[in-house]
Image (cartoon, rainbow, N blue to C red):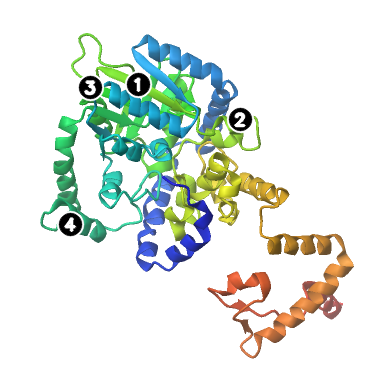
Amino acid sequence: MQVQSMQFKARAGQKLADQRLQQNLTKLSTKFVSARATAMTAIDFPATRAALKERRNRALENLDVWLETFEREAARRGVTVLFAETTQEAARLVGDIARRHEVKKVIKTKSMVTEEMRLNEVLGQMGVQSIETDLGEYILQINDNEPPSHIIAPVVHKDKDEIADLFAKTHNRPRLTEITDMTREAREMLRPHFMTADMGVTGGNFVVAETGSVVLVTNEGNEGMCTVMPRVHVAVTGIEKVLPTLEDLATAMRLLPRSATGQATSNYFSVLTGPRGEGDQDGPEHMYVVLVDGGRTGLIGGDFQEMLRCIRCGACMNHCPVYQKVGGHAYGWVYPGPMGSVLTPSYVGIDKALDLPQAATLCGECNSVCPVGIPLSDLLRKLREKQVERRLRPWKERAGLAVWGFLALHPDAYALFTKLAVRVLERMGGRNRSIARLPLGGAGWTNTRDMPAPVGRTFRELYAAQRSHIG
């Protein structure tokens, strides 16, 4: 997926004007938000979050040790573990595996890391057919390879009628409108690919060091078909997803499905340990794990290391008032919402995502729901500070902040400025006492709303008058 984060403002404006999208995005609050709140009542969320945070920190503090342990234990069970410094290298490694095993068709589960790698594009250039089997990702693939707008529900931005039209057009079948009929049609279209694919590619929600296992969590069961039917299985995930023990995994699984979809547990939970062994009835003949850096080690020991605790549940974006209005495509890369506003600048460069740290109200809702206690609003504020330090913000903005800084440090000048400003704004309000267009940097606010005009006196003046009246 190409990085288009520099176009956030323009994209956000388009999404705000899309009434159909606005209606579709209400699913976030009516389904995910309310379901999560209900699911969390069954556990002690603060205590469980503190426990998972500590376990994720323990893994990150000795990341090299646990990765080496995973590699050793996985190799002992017949898995080939490969490391990729960049996403391009990771895509090349998967392509090499496909070439080595003379693969003609790949079936895939949903994986954000493979989106980083642009894996489908790379395989296509090799002449290898790559089929997405997650229902949401499949819908996007047949819709001109549209990128996902959510990391858990990639097609949350579309409604049933849009998907019904797409199925009728692509499958050349009568248009269906019942969800059960539409999902059955999708199964009928995907089943031949499951039966004839040479290689399955999955992500990895976690990898477990002590057993050399890859953990997959889905609600559709497609991960089983992708890992059991083909003769080759390749799991691709980020290096930060390692957990030391199965006990750590148990703690993570108490929070991941509850945070993501509001379920106590996902419909399908697989712990895959090695390829098919002697006497096994199913499983791949060959299993590979590709562990991707892709900028992750650059966060270790720095201001943004806490972001590596992220377990990709999507809770932060489900609750974010900005994401709820603009959706995922506005963010312009793989990871949207608050998590994406930190990860994208961290992975691709702060100069390639100037608007994303600003795409937040800093309300702190993301902090409160994060299952691993990542202080996302603090990290977004740090990114804003770094942009100012590197003089990456527009000169008008920097000049405005410089003026504000001067006034904040000089109370008399501040008092004089505000006294003049409120009187000017009062006159601008006219008879309606409403300002339709603010000057200078305020125009962005009044482009979509009017601003009530002040009464023409500052708070200090009003407070002094009130005290005088009481006295």
- Whether residue 456 is visible, yes or no, is no
Q: CA distance from mark 3 to mark 4?
A: 33 Å
Q: Which class describes the residues within 10 Å of circle 4: few (<14), some (14-19), or many (20+)? A: few
3 or 2: tag closer to the N-terminus: 3
Mark 1 falls on what kind of element? strand
Q: Nearer the viewer, residue 431 or 464?
A: 431
- Amino acid residing under circle 4: Lys
Q: Is residue 35 above or below residue 239?
A: below
4 or 1: tag closer to the N-terminus: 4
Report which residue position mark 3 lands on.
231
- Amino acid residing under circle 2: Ile
Q: CA distance from mark 2 to mark 1?
A: 26 Å
- Which disc, if any, is residue 438? none
Mark 3 falls on what kind of element? loop
Left or right position of 14 against 449 = left
2 or 1: tag closer to the N-terminus: 1
Left or right position of 183 against 253 = left
Residue mark closest to the camera, 3 vs 2:
3
- Which disc, if any, is residue 169? 4
- Amino acid residing under circle 3: Arg
Q: Is the residue under label 1 in contact with that under label 4 (CB below 8 Å)?
A: no
Report which residue position mark 2 lands on.
300
2 or 4: tag closer to the N-terminus: 4
- Amino acid residing under circle 1: Tyr
Q: Position of residue 173 (x, y in %)?
A: 11, 54
Residue mark closest to the camera, 2 vs 4:
4
Report which residue position mark 1 lands on.
288
Q: Is the residue under label 1 in contact with that under label 2 (CB below 8 Å)?
A: no
Q: Specify the quadrant of the image occupied by residue 297.
A: top right
3 or 4: tag closer to the N-terminus: 4
